[in-house]
Image (cartoon, rainbow, N blue to C red):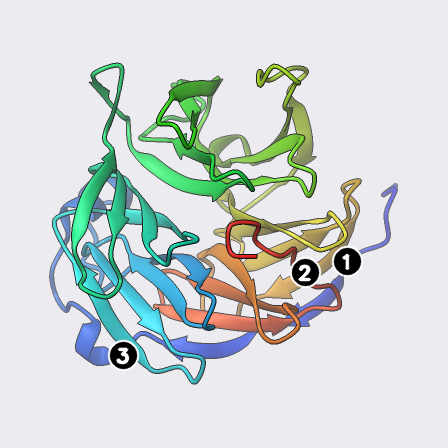
């Protein structure tokens, strides 16, 4: 018998569809040869993030592009380069920091589209394939290094890049680390472990190390958890790729809401926006849509933009 009542359903609506002029027809990108069984795909959207003016940035992993959607839904191309951009955050100075599967951590100037390396190696070794990132109040950047890890190879990592440039491996031995988010007081790092279909809870000790890391959520079905966000009351929002859903949990892990994504099953990442921060924006990757759902709870303010 379930300990919790079933979550209430919310249906997401389309905010914007990637315009046809930006869809690449009849070609297979290098990224899709391995990650999508060689399929010809016209886009694969991820990494939604708002700037302080209400513009929504998002990436196309498959074709190395960064887009921007205005509050009214007009889409323009910000940058295009030889990369596989995935997670994205807008930094305090307005620049974009991107976790690029092919190149490592990259910095992008949204005014000019210029792309420069930000953090490409760890101890002179290339990353496996970085995936997503979170930014703390002090500017510390946490990012996952997923590559092709999974239950067959649990060697994924979470890195911490401090404002002074120091880089360390905060967690190792992870089967497919993906999205990540800090708790409201930044004492806990939550990590989506996609191939284990779980979300891990990693307490951050006073000396900065991790201790007593455990499973906070155990999901089932689909492909597994992907991008995440924190609500204003400390709850956790989890995009469930392959399930066509986003789950909203309380701060103790109670399932409160299921957001249905009816344009496809590949709900990959989320960002809160809107005038009261209660609109949840969702990338539905394979159909090339960004969806929007109105939630009963607001998202937490992003510390680096506050």
Splitting the image into 4 quarters, where does residue 202 fall?
Answer: top right
Image point (31%, 74%), residue name: 18
Looking at the picture, does residue 217 appear above or below residue 289?
A: above
* Residue 258 - label: 2
CA gap, disc 1 to disc 2? 6 Å
CA gap, disc 3 to disc 2? 28 Å
As helix, strand or loop, the secondary structure at mark 2 comes to strand
As helix, strand or loop, the secondary structure at mark 3 comes to loop
Image point (55%, 48%), residue name: 228
Report whether residue 193 is seen.
yes
Precedes in sequence: disc 1 or disc 2? 1
* Residue 19 - label: 3
Query: Is residue 99 rendered to the left or right of residue 133?
Result: left
Tag in front: 1 or 3: 3
* Residue 7 - label: 1
Precedes in sequence: disc 1 or disc 3? 1
Report whether residue 152 is seen.
no
**Disc 1 + disc 2, Cβ < 8 Å:** yes
Splitting the image into 4 quarters, where does residue 65 fall?
Answer: bottom left
Query: Is residue 48 rendered to the left or right of residue 250?
Result: left
As helix, strand or loop, the secondary structure at mark 1 comes to loop
């Amino acid at each position: 018998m379930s300990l919790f009542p079933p979550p209430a359903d919310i249906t997401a609506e389309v905010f914007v569809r990637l315009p046809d002029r930006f869809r690449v027809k009849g070609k297979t990108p290098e990224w899709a040869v391995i990650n999508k069984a060689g399929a010809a795909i016209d886009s694969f959207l991820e990494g939604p993030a708002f700037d302080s003016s209400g513009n929504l940035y998002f990436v196309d992993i498959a074709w190395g592009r960064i887009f921007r959607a205005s509050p009214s839904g007009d889409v323009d191309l910000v940058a295009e380069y030889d990369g596989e951009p995935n997670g994205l955050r807008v930094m305090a100075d307005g620049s974009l920091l991107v976790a690029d599967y092919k190149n490592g951590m990259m910095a992008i100037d949204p005014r000019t589209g210029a792309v420069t390396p930000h953090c490409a190696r760890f101890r002179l070794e290339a990353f496996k394939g970085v995936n997503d990132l979170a930014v703390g109040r002090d500017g510390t950047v946490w990012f996952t290094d997923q590559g092709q890890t999974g239950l067959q190879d649990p060697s994924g990592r979470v890195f911490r890049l401090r404002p002074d440039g120091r880089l360390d491996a905060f967690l190792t031995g992870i089967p497919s680390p993906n999205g990540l988010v800090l708790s409201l007081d930044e004492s806990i790092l939550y990590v989506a472990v996609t191939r284990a279909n779980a979300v891990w809870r990693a307490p951050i000790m006073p000396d900065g190390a991790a201790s007593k890391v455990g499973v906070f959520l155990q999901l089932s079905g689909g492909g597994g958890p992907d991008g995440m966000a924190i609500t204003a009351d400390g709850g956790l929002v989890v995009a469930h790729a392959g399930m066509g859903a986003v789950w909203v949990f309380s701060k103790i892990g109670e399932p409160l809401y299921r957001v249905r994504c009816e344009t496809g099953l590949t709900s990959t990442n989320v960002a809160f926006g809107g005038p009261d921060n209660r609109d949840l924006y969702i990338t539905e990757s394979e159909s090339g849509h960004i969806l929007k759902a109105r939630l009963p709870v607001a998202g937490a303010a992003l510390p680096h933009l506050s």
